Image (cartoon, rainbow, N blue to C red):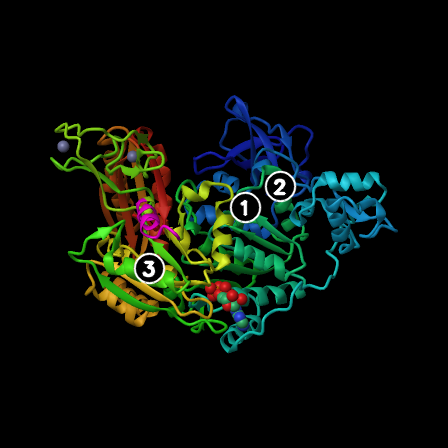
Amino acid sequence: MTGPILQVALPSPLRRLFDYRAPRGVSAADLQVGQRVRVPFGNRAMVGMIAGISDHTEVPANRLKPAEALLDLTPVLPDSLWRLCLWTARYYQHGLGDTLSVALPVLLRQGEPALARQDQLWQLQPGAYPEHPAVQRAPKQKQAVQILAQHPHGLSHALIGQWGLSRDTLVTLEGKGLVQRIERSPHHVAEPLPLLREAHLTANAEQQAALDAILGAEGFHTWLLEGVTGSGKTEVYLQAIERCLLSGHQALVLIPEIGLTPQTLSRFQQRFSAPVVILHSGLNDRERLDAWIAARDGDASIVIGTRSAIFTPLARPGLIIVDEEHDLSYKQQDGLRYNARDLAVYRGHLEQVPVILGSATPSFESLHNVQQGRYRHLRLTLRAGNAKAPTFQCLDIRSRPLEGGLSRPLTELVGEHLKRGNQVLVFINRRGFAPTLMCHDCGWIAECRRCDARMTVHQSPPHLHCHHCNSQRPLDRHCPKCQSEDLRPLGAGTERTEEFLKERFPHTDVLRIDRESMSRKRAMQDMMDTIQSAKPCILVGTQMLAKGHHFPNVTLVAILDADGGLFSADFRGPERMAQMITQVAGRAGRAEKPGQVIIQTHMAEHPLLIELTERGYPAIAERELAEREMAQLPPYRFMALLRAEANQASAAEDFLEAALEQAEVLIGQHNLADIDLLGPVPSPMERRAGRHRAQLLLQAAQRSALHQLVHMLLPLLEQHPQARKVRWSIDIDPLDM
Ligand code: ADP
Ligand code: ZN
Ligand code: ZN
């Protein structure tokens, strides 16, 4: 055999590497793990990454193909990020090639050079200044000159967009002789500006104690910053970042959803004059790559993004923050099912930098990690400034009529708050007009034809919509069973609540906030404007409302239906419900005005509700964790969930039966202790989008035994003849089941 063998990770679902010869003309000395190569795969070309270099292969010489081209001179990822990807693939039992393609920007996956678009900087010409006559009547150009004046050493190409400048403007200025392009020196360092645009707030005693702890510790620690809503967690982040930047490092901030939290973002931009890159879904592929490169090369000081931003390389990492660490959006629910919060902790360990997990309602996993001594607990128990904590009250709605989901006493209370000139927030966790369409004569219910689920009634425009598979159809005119025309929407969703409140309070603005209403372009801004205006108004919305917003003039928060979480089949139901109520409630009474929280329920005596309203989230967490320990559930036991789905009714369960048998054999052969195999059973919604679904749960006392089992099991399943009839996946540390 001549020459080195490249073991290439390719974006394929198979958990293996593929062997190739080195590209023609490339010598062994040019090859490194972490470089990308273009290779022939089937009858097309694919971009993959060199994951290993070996001198032998099992592939017969006549079938071993050479790679077509080497795409990078050096590894495309810094070493720590490469190691993070290796660990991610191993931990989540996913193919390395596919893991890398989640981690890399699209253009790099497609083989684009991993270099800044131009290794060039924009700089003012000597003699150009903001009052220059040539820009006086061109506000954009004037602004560009102002911004460049703050960057005497030049502003890199990747960052001009982040400063609100367009390339065209700069080219025009170049034509006027006011701006020039200069070559970037290989060790370009961002210029030492005054770091802060505005002074930081004076930390209160609790904030200061948290900061002292975080900044006083060396190296890697995970801090769980548990602070009630409005306690000033963000200010702690900002001051920790300030120190991080002052010492010449970069900070990575993960947030749950960018579109929903413009306020948080603008606080970062207002505070720092250092370059902030925001990885949001509105970026095109090129902008995303530019931002990625700016982070990797150290041009960006602060990187803010959602889940996948955890894979952003940093030249000088100094701090990782995960805001609202309990949020479910950190868990990817398909393909590579990773949890960005957990990866953040591992990455902090790899990079030896502190990790701050912040939340008003920490996940029970994180609280457990505190109990185990793995994370350190920091608490902010008081609201910052003069804001007061809200008061809670359960409103028993048994046998009370509901209109638009509201009971009479609640509607009256809404009126009182409005009369006092305040704003009201009405939370209902269902979009659409009504969750059910029912025949009043025979009890028929409109169901989805492709799912085991009911159709939701929507009003504008009128139609039936399945929220699980997205299928839609016109409203039935008469009952298909008894031909009656008396079909009635049953229960309330956001649209119906909105309609009722508009009717009842015709002179008050009623704003609906849910996925449909927010898909309109300016919806978010309109909402913010109304809220800031401090005029009396009613906000009706789903949990979108609960995410990180500040509603300083809201004095009443009404939760229309809290009962779902009380008898949920998921063992995490109580945790979710307590988080949701606490988060929604936290929107009230943030400024000087005290807030009132009303929870409508049919189960006012439920211990969970009583505990939550009287003693708050930490008490619930403590009790529920004790119950989980008794019941041997996560975080006291480790889980992996094998899911399968198929068009044919029995195929998924047959496949999982085969998996169960294999797993039992492996457990016996390798003497794996204390592993339970539960199932296969039909998934909670057995039929979805026309496919039949089932699951097999693997549970163990030891994470290592569980991973060992899954690691041996999956290659066998990939080969299994039944596997071709199903779509299957593994979910490590599953969150929904
Ligand atoms: P959290 O992120 O915990 O919900 P924030 O950081 O958003 O809380 O702070 C809530 C409000 O309190 C914000 O308006 C913020 O400006 C204000 N605030 C935070 N810290 C202080 C402080 N030390 N002094 C005065 N106001 C503060
Ligand atoms: Zn009928
Ligand atoms: Zn459906």
Q: Which of 129/345 is in front? A: 129
Amino acid type indicated by mark 1? His
| Numbered disc in front, either 2 or 3 | 3
> Does any atom of ligand 1 lie closer than 8 Å to the CB of label 3?
no
Q: Quadrant of the N terminus?
A: top right
Q: Please name the residue that numbered disc 3 is placed on.
A: 414
Dots 3, 1 in contact, CB < 8 A: no
Q: What residue lies at 25% left-to-right and 45% top-to-bottom?
A: 664
Amino acid type indicated by mark 3? Val
Spatial CA span between label 2 and label 1: 10 Å
User: Relative to 438, does residue 669 appear above or below in the rendering?
Assistant: below
* x and y percentages locating residue 27 in the rendered image: 68, 35
In the displayed structure, does residue 486 sit left or right of residue 350? left
- The tally of labels here is 3
Please tell me which of labels 2 and 1 falls first in the chain. 1
Magenta span of residues: 496-507
The local secondary structure at tag 1 comes to: loop
Amino acid type indicated by mark 2? Glu
